[in-house]
Image (cartoon, helix red, strand yellow):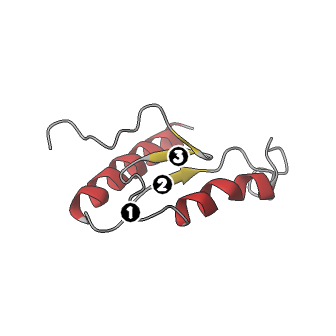
Amino acid sequence: MATYKVSKAALNAYTRLMARKYKNTLVNCVSPGYVITDMTYQTGTTTADEGAKGPVMAALLPDNGPSGVCFNQTEIAPFSSTIIPGF
């Protein structure tokens, strides 16, 4: 579980770095939640259709939408910010 958490933290940081580098492109990441799939041995709490809502919403954001944020399903995760301190 520790490696999974580290990989998520790295993805969040990389998202912010890429959003800063590519200012004319929206760069975000999405956690679809604990989805019922073969990967979770069908133990998830969210259907595949429900889990797909976040990635689809992020893909269809308008050009002036947020960038450099991480979505928890369809909501911006509370630790995310479009303002990156120190940059």
Secondary structure at numbered mark 3: strand
- In the image, residue 71 above or below residue 77: below
Residue position for label 3:
71
Image coords of residue 73 (percent x, y)? 62, 46
Residue closest to the eye, 43 or 30: 30
Q: Is residue 19 left or right of residue 6?
A: left
Marks 3/2: CA–CA distance: 6 Å
Contact flag, marks 3 and 2 (Cβ < 8 Å): yes
As measured in the structure, the alpha-carbon distance from the residue carrying label 3 to the one carrying label 1 is 13 Å
Residue under label 2: 29
User: Measured from the top left, where is residue 24 in percent x and y?
Assistant: 28, 68
Q: With 83 as the anchor, is 54 left or right in this view?
A: right
Is the residue marked by circle 1 packed among few (<14), some (14-19), or many (20+) residues within 10 Å?
Answer: many
x and y percentages locating residue 32 in the rendered image? 64, 50
Q: Residue at x 71, y 44 (%)?
A: 34
Query: Could you tell me residue 62's position as x and y percent?
Result: 47, 63
Three-letter residue code for mark 2: Cys
Q: Earlier in the sequence, mark 3 or mark 1?
A: 1
**Badge 3 or badge 2: first in the primary sequence:** 2
- Determine the secondary structure under disc 1: loop
Q: Which mark is residue 26?
A: 1
* Amino acid type at mark 3: Phe
Q: Is residue 31 left or right of residue 13?
A: right
